[in-house]
Image: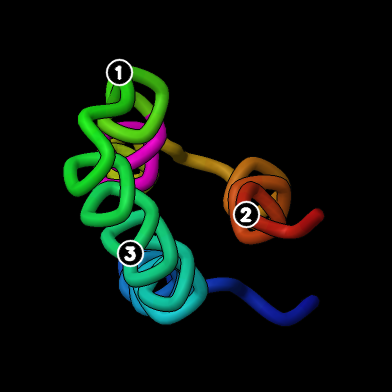
Amino acid sequence: MGIATDITKAKVIVKEKLRADRKPLLEAQDILFQKAQETSADTTAIVTEKQRLRDITNDVDAMSTESALKTKMTALES
C-alpha cells in the first residue's frame, strides 16, 4: 500500500502557497498602478494583471489529482 494524498488538505496547501507567492507581486502592481495614475498613464495592463493574480486560486477546488495541484503550485514562478 502506497502513501495516499489527502486531496482536500493538499488544496488548502496549494492555495496558501499561491497566496503567499502572489502577495509581493500584487504589491508591486499596486505601486505601478499608483505611479501610472500620477502620470495619467494607461492602467489597463496593470488592472488585468492584478485580476489574473487574484484569480490564480479560483480553479484549485475543481482539481482532483495531485499532479494537477503540483502543476498549479508553479503557476506564479517565472
Horizontal side, residue 67 vs residue 73: left or right? right
52 in magenta? yes
* Residue found at x 81% / y 54%: 78
56 in magenta? no
Rendering coords of residue 4 (x, y %): 62, 74
* Residue found at x 31% / y 54%: 35
Q: What residue type is labelled 1?
A: Thr
Check the image and report above or below for 15 versus 17.
above
Q: What residue type is labelled 2?
A: Leu
* Residue found at x 31% / y 27%: 41
Please identify the quadrant where the N terminus is shown.
bottom right
Horizontal side, residue 55 vs residue 5: left or right? left
> Range of the magenta residues?
49-54
Rendering coords of residue 30 (x, y %): 27, 60
Determine the image quadrant of residue 46: top left
Residue 23 in view, yes or no: yes
Q: How far apart are marks 2 and 1 (CA)?
A: 20 Å
